[in-house]
Amino acid sequence: MLPRGPFSGLLTDLYELTMAAGYVQNRFNARATFELFVRTLPRRRNYLVAAGLEQALDFLENVRFSSEDISYLRGLPFFRHVQSDFFDYLSRFEFTGEVCALPEGTIFFPGEPLLRVTAPIAEAQLVETSLLSILHFQTLIASKAARVTNAASGRPVVEFGSRRAHGVEAGVLAARAAFVGGCEGTSNTYAGRRFGIPVYGTQAHSWIMAHEDEAEAFRDFLSVFPENSTLLVDTYDVRAAVEKIIALGRKPGGVRLDSGDVLTDSLWVRRRLDQAGWHDAQIFASGELDEDRIETLVQSGASIDAFGVGTALSTSADSPNLGVIYKLVEVDLGDTVRNAAKFSQEKITYPGRKQVFRFVEGEGKFSRDVIGLDGESFQGGAPLLVLVMRGGRRLEAPEKDPLAGIERARKRFLADRSGLPEPVLALRAAEPPFPVRYSKQLEELHDQVRQTVAKTARIA
């Protein structure tokens, strides 16, 4: 699970391999630049959170084609006419390119490159599928976590979604991405071991049901975990369960509400715990929670100290995908550079290597972003994309302590979120959306490329 490499080069789509074969066989080895970005925001989203870069760089450093991989490809009908040069190329394949990226935790918007890859064109093409998959998933989950944690208004949120994630590896990576997006921790113990993320857990209804008496279930659990037990109180009757815990005379770390009228129950439970003198015993809420339910509970004055969010978070249930794409923007032919763009309706892309510049007002609030050409500069505009890989190797080695890197990404996200204008932080779509525009130079280049392409294609 979650290998650090080597990664099979077959973790790609067939057409990446057929194009690579075409490039190799026709000796077209120009250096190309591709940019990975999100075309439009999902429903009710106002911003996105970059996540997954560490895993993307792991992949690029360690992707290889084994002899078994190559034998498999040789046996496919698609490759019956492909010359042996291509298979020799695959046997020696290593990514040798340059990568610029938004640091993990950076808040960004549609059209802004999350990643920029410059490499021999066959290399850049072969890594497309995995880069899209890696960055898409973690960015999706980190962006969802950002909404959930913002709705909690400072109350801790723990990621609880492993059992509903789309596979065990997805559960681990969802825990990582959710931490970047502001969660305090996860219930996934492998994510805790692998990434150093704090782990949290309580008990299931099955623990209560396995005992003949609910009070016995509480007593037995407290005997094993006397200091930090969080006891589940909604298996049968919330109020009766709380009275049984109080009667035991042993203060738990807290209680968990997983169903029912959480607002009303939380207020009653808080009152009884306080009457028992257990003012620091916490009330933890879970059970089909999402950002909307959490916002309603918080605004209604629910007496809840922390939330556990599962399915809605680990699957981004309301918007389970992003329109993330990887598009060619430049081909360096040695003596000339050809800028590339797409002009089909509703799928227009902009040419040239790009940089994102962020402008901040005096109060520390983001005012606008400008997408310009790499090499441009703007007074007051901070460039966001940074060089992270050259010659196929990271410029900074991975942290020995995996938590250090993720915590840095989390702090970056929290700092960025504090810079967003209030309408952009809302759960509903902001009107108007956060302002992002293209620079004058980029617009002019776009027009030039359009005119050039129009000579050979029918473009209005």
Image (tube, rainbow, N blue to C red):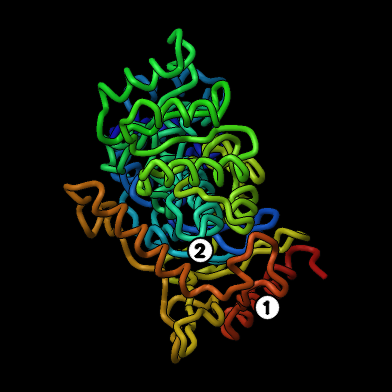
Q: Position of residue 261 (x, y in %)?
A: 65, 38
Q: Nearer the viewer, residue 24 or 56?
A: 56
| Residue at mark 1 | 447
Q: Position of residue 242 (x, y in %)?
A: 47, 31
- Please report the residue visible at 61 percent of the width from the left and 51 percent of the height from the top: 297
Three-letter amino acid code at the position of disc 2: Pro
Q: Residue at x 33, y 46 (%)?
A: 95
Q: Can residue 181 be spotted in the picture?
A: no
- The location of residue 372, given as percent across then percent down, is 52, 78
Query: The residue tagged with tag 1: helix, strand or loop?
Result: helix
Q: Is residue 77 left or right of residue 31?
A: right
Check the image and name the residue furthest to the right: 460
Q: Is 86 left, or right, of 15 in this rendering?
A: left
Q: Please indicate, yes or no, whether residue 42 appears anywhere in the rendered image.
A: yes
Q: Position of residue 224 (x, y in %)?
A: 25, 22
- SS class of the residue under badge 2? loop
Q: Residues within 10 Å of mark 2 (few under 14, many from 20)?
A: many
Pick the front one: 92 or 45: 45
Q: What residue sits 24% from the left and 53% below the top?
A: 404
Of 307 and 253, which appears nearest the observer? 253
Q: Quadrant of the C terminus?
A: bottom right
Quadrant position of residue 61: top left
Q: Is residue 165 above or below residue 304?
A: above
The answer for how far apart the CA atoms under marks 1 and 2 are is 20 Å
**Residue 113 circle label:** 2
